[in-house]
Image: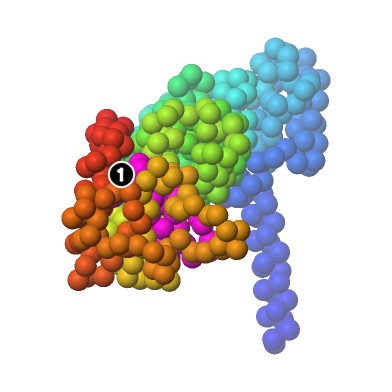
Amino acid sequence: MVQEFLKSTESLNSAIAELRKMHPLPSELASLYSELTDSVLANSQNLHRRLSELPDNQSVIKYAWHLKTSELRLIFPALLLPESQNRRSQDRLFLLVRERACQTMYNSAWAVFQQNPDSSTLQKALSLLCGILEIKHQSSPELTVANLFRQSPAKALKDNKSENKSGYLPLISEIAQPDNRQFIKRLALAASYNRSDLQSFFQMYGINPNSALAANIVSQSFIHQHHYTLTDIVLFKQVLEQSSVETQAELADSLLTAPEILPEVFHQYCLIIYQKFGNIDHSSPLWSRIRESARSEFRNWLIQATVGTHTRNSREKQRFYARYTDFINRVEQFSEDTLLIYFDGFVIADNRQDFDSAMYYGGSNASEHPFEIVDPEELDKDPASPATPHITCEEALRANDTDSTVILYLNQAQIKNSSAFIDFCLQNSRGTIRAIKRKIFG
């Protein structure tokens, strides 16, 4: 009895597998037709050969109505064949589209188009197909998924958050015609109506995230600052890897100058830029291609991220340095534990293992090194060590001294004195005016 049941189950699974091959779901078509495989190419060539043997267009029309469903899916791949790049072949394939236009053809046509969105032939053919299907949907009293999606893109995105289960995809022409010059930009704009993420938009319209079309939409969406969400970071990273240097520069410039991005989101996107292109001082050609305002934003982020990471175990230090972020010129890792924080006219050496203090170095040499090293044996000396000869903030304030080595106590009891001393130093620094201008005017 068990063996019979297993045999029947195996037969059922085989039958289902065969049916899925004959009638794949839209999401499966994206993978089946994302590339012109050998079998698809061979079948498309057979279709083209049979069409070329027909004597006239009337014969083509009769032949169109004898095509099986599986053969309808070969029309758009056939349009890409080298032997189809002539007027006669394209006219006959377009005639097949006119005669047998249906949602099944659209599903496969849309999958092929996504991998070849720059093909003018596919743009015209898909626009033709969409136009015919729109007329059919308008004239049909049936309540189809396509009819449901005849509302505005914004409302469609709002009301239809889950993948269509009926096997039909909404026509992309509801947003823009594929042969429209602004096609990609309009899709990117429509995607911006989706307040969650781009991936929801892709899922709704059956767009393969790994396709060339998806890469174009993602690029346009980010370049025009429509989408910056944590969910879309994967798409941003993917398109950054695939794009040319010019597009990469546009993406980076757009991100770094985009208004109203949540700090935690901005941080994660900047991490991707840093991992890919390094610091501004590195030799990546990207940095020379973006505006100074964008480089300035990235420089500020890098300073904040470095100081924030360095002081992550000390809340008092984090608050102290956050107050002076706009006045920091650069940071430099002196050792694994010690960070040098450069201001205009002085530098602070901070050891992350010391939660209560840091060392201030003023004077003309502060921008080069926190102290002069005469003895080579002292090269490994930690500039943040409290053992370095110093004076206190109170003593420095009483003497109006900004050139000496000063210990900054950053515990709750004495941090106010350290802040008062740094405020005094900044008031006497010409770099403060420049920092304030950067903050106000960018």
Q: What residue sits right under mark 1 in the picture?
A: 326
Q: Is residue 269 above or below residue 117?
A: below
Q: Is residue 89 left or right of residue 53?
A: left
**Residue closest to the eye, 115 or 250:** 250
Where does the C terminus fall, quadrant-wise? top left
Give the magenta range: 323-352
In this picture, is 258 found above or below 304?
A: above
Which residue is outermost to the bottom? Answer: 1
* Residue 413 lies in the magenta stretch: no
Q: Quadrant of residue 246?
A: top right
- Residue found 67% across the figure and 22% down from its top: 93
Residue 321 percent coordinates (x, y): 31, 56
Question: Along the line of sight, which residue is nearer the eye, 421 or 17?
Answer: 421
Secondary element at image label 1? helix
Image position, residue 305 (x, y; %)? 41, 53
- Residue 154 visible here: no
Q: What amino acid is found at the position of numbered circle 1 in the picture? A: Asp
Which residue is painted at 59% across and 32% down in the image?
285
Q: Residue at x 52, y 33 (%)?
A: 287
In the rendered image, residue 60, in percent from the top left (x then y), is placed at: 70, 21
Is residue 241 visible in the rendered image? The answer is yes
Compared to residue 306, the image places residue 214 above or below, namely: above
